[in-house]
Image: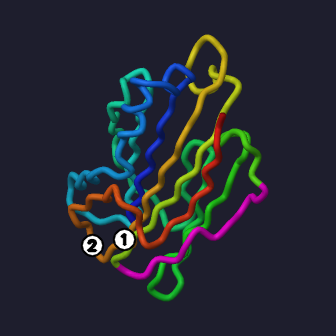
């Protein structure tokens, strides 16, 4: 089974300095994944977490859902998943306008390949000039960091993605100001 955790961290220039920057930087890069209500293991289990300035960077845990072993999309980020023997190939597809500046030089890139019972992390960030796109008012810049944890598990464990880096990492992180 594949477990995907999407974490979106969003802020404006009000949180670039202290004390809000300290709260933003303290957001974990992984959270405990909720268990399924009926205990069944789907091919792909997806968990969304949103963390934003408006909640003083306290996580909002959205419902976990099930998906299929092809593509998963979240906030302009598309993951293509392919089973290669017993391993999972994770391909990152970038829709630049939704991720924001700076412009990415690629549209499709292999992030990593996961053996059974291993996990990887994708980290990407972006800046937007239209705050209204993400529900902020007043114009100006909004900033986003997306963290995507992906596990190739043999069952539905009580999984906690640790805050430490994985052995499989894909990063496209730019200086946003």
Is 138 rendered above or below residue 64? above
Q: Label 2 belongs to which residue?
A: 155
Is residue 14 shown above or below 159?
above
State the image quarter where residue 115 is shown.
bottom left
Q: Residue furthest front?
A: 18
Cα distance in 3D space between marks 1 and 2: 6 Å
Measuring from the top left, give residue 28's x and y in whole percent.
35, 46
- Looking at the rendered structure, the secondary structure element under dot 1 is loop
Q: Judging from the image, what secondary structure is the residue with disc 2 in?
A: loop
* Corner quadrant of residue 79: bottom right
Residue 116 image offset from top left, x and y in percent:
38, 81
Task: Report the span colored magenta.
Answer: 105-116
Are dots 1 and 2 in contact, CB under 8 Å?
yes
**Residue most toward the bottom?**
85
Residue at 35% over, 60% down: 164
Q: Position of residue 53 (x, y in %)?
A: 44, 25
177 lies left or right of 15: right
Query: Circle 1 sits on which residue?
Result: 1
Q: How is the image coloured?
A: rainbow
Looking at the rendered image, the quarter that the N terminus falls into is bottom left
- The residue positioned 43% from the left and 73% from the top of the image is 167
Instruction: Decide whether residue 102 is among the magenta residues.
Output: no
Within 10 Å of disc 2 (Cα), the crowding (few <14, some 14-19, many 20+) is some
x then y, percent, for residue 85:
49, 88
Residue appearing at x 43%, y 63% in the figure = 150
Q: Could you tell me which residue is drawn at 23 percent across and 55 percent down?
A: 35
Asked whether 28 or 94 is in front, the reply is 28
Quarter of the rendering occupied by the C terminus:
top right
**Mark drawn on residue 125:** none
Question: Residue 164 versus residue 80: which sits nearer the camera?
Answer: 164
Sort mark 1 into few (<14), some (14-19) or many (20+) by Cα contacts within 10 Å: some
């Amino acid at each position: 089974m594949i477990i995907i955790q999407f974490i979106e961290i969003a802020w404006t220039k009000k949180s670039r300095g202290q004390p809000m920057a300290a709260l933003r930087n303290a957001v974990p890069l992984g959270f405990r994944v909720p268990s399924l209500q009926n205990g069944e293991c789907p091919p792909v289990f997806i968990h969304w977490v949103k963390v934003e300035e408006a909640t003083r960077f306290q996580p909002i845990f959205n419902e976990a859902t099930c998906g299929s072993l092809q593509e998963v999309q979240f906030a302009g980020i598309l993951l293509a998943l392919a089973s290669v023997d017993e391993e999972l190939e994770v391909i990152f597809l970038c829709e630049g306008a939704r991720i924001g500046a700076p412009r990415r030089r690629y549209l499709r890139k292999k992030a990593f390949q996961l053996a059974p019972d291993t996990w990887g992390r994708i980290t990407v960030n972006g800046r937007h000039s239209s705050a209204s796109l993400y529900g902020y008012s007043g114009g100006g810049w909004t900033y986003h960091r997306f963290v995507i944890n992906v596990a190739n598990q043999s069952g539905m464990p009580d999984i906690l993605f640790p805050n430490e880096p994985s052995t499989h990492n894909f990063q496209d992180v730019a200086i946003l100001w």
